[in-house]
Image (cartoon, grey):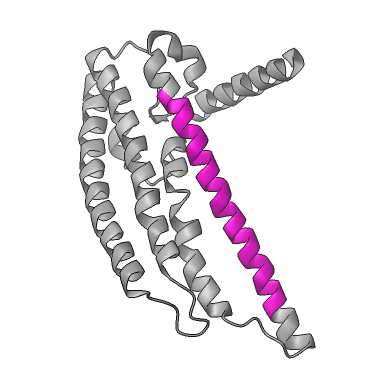
Amino acid sequence: MHSNPSSADAGADAPTLSALDRRLGKVETGFNLVAALAIFVLMLIGVWQVLGRTLFNAPVRGYIDFVELSISTFAFLGIAYCQRLGGHVRMEMILKPMRGRLLWSTEIFGTLVALAVIAVLIWYGWGHFLRAYQLGDSTIDAELPVWPSKLAVPVAFALLWLRLLVQLAGYLRLAVDPRRRPVAVTTVLSPEELAAHEIEESIGAAERDRAR
């Protein structure tokens, strides 16, 4: 499994990177909450659609349009949050045997490729948004504007690009000195290490609550 190590312990020797990681993490969490809210609202509209059509013969006008427009929200806004937690599919069979500079150099290469790909997606995503905004593009049924939905794609990718940039800095730091404690990077943990990490986080959260 993957885990993004807490920067609280390791931030002493990388305060700037640790601070960037925490601040960007707050934005990513906010985006992820918006995506979760979009899913919840879509679920409510779906219930309303079924009950309204069945009981009152009054379906939601433009229900399909709402579904289409909401897809980009919950599909992309949480992508940077997922990257921070290491939730994306990775080639662990290749990475797991690696150690030290070889591992971090491989991560640097993969992150550079990802930065280039995401930059291209941001460019074209922004172009699609501008075209939809300038043409006044709308859905067929309810004639809802589609540009807010298309704007969510380059914005979400821009946040992912920033996350990858922070992770690149973390990998470069470890490539220079593999003995340093990881900050703002995703690492592969064994089940035992993951359990120990979760216990440490739980104890730390409990101590912070008592301090308040």
- Quarter residue 46 falls in: bottom right
| Residue 187 drawn in magenta | no
205 lies left or right of 174: right
Q: Give the x, y percent position of residue 166.
A: 34, 29
Q: Residue at 74% of width from left, 82% of height from top?
A: 52
Q: In this view, does 72 lie above or below 173?
A: below
Report if residue 3 is visible in the image: no
Q: Is residue 30 depicted above or below 124 in this figure?
A: above
Q: Which quadrant, please, contains the C terminus?
A: top right
x and y, in percent, of residue 157 in the image: 35, 49
**Above/below status of 79 relative to 5:** below
Foreground pick, 102 / 35: 35
- Magenta includes 43? yes
Residue occupying image coordinates x 40% and y 45%: 88
Q: Where is residue 115 in the image (x, y as percent from the top left)?
A: 25, 42
Q: Residue at x 42, y 77 (%)?
A: 138
- Which region is colored magenta? 20-49
Question: In the displayed image of the protein, which residue is found farthest to the right?
Answer: 55
- Magenta stretch: dominant secondary structure: helix
Please name the residue shown 61% across and 55% down the image.
37
Between residues 138 and 23, which one lies in front from this camera angle?
138
Q: Quadrant of residue 133?
A: bottom left
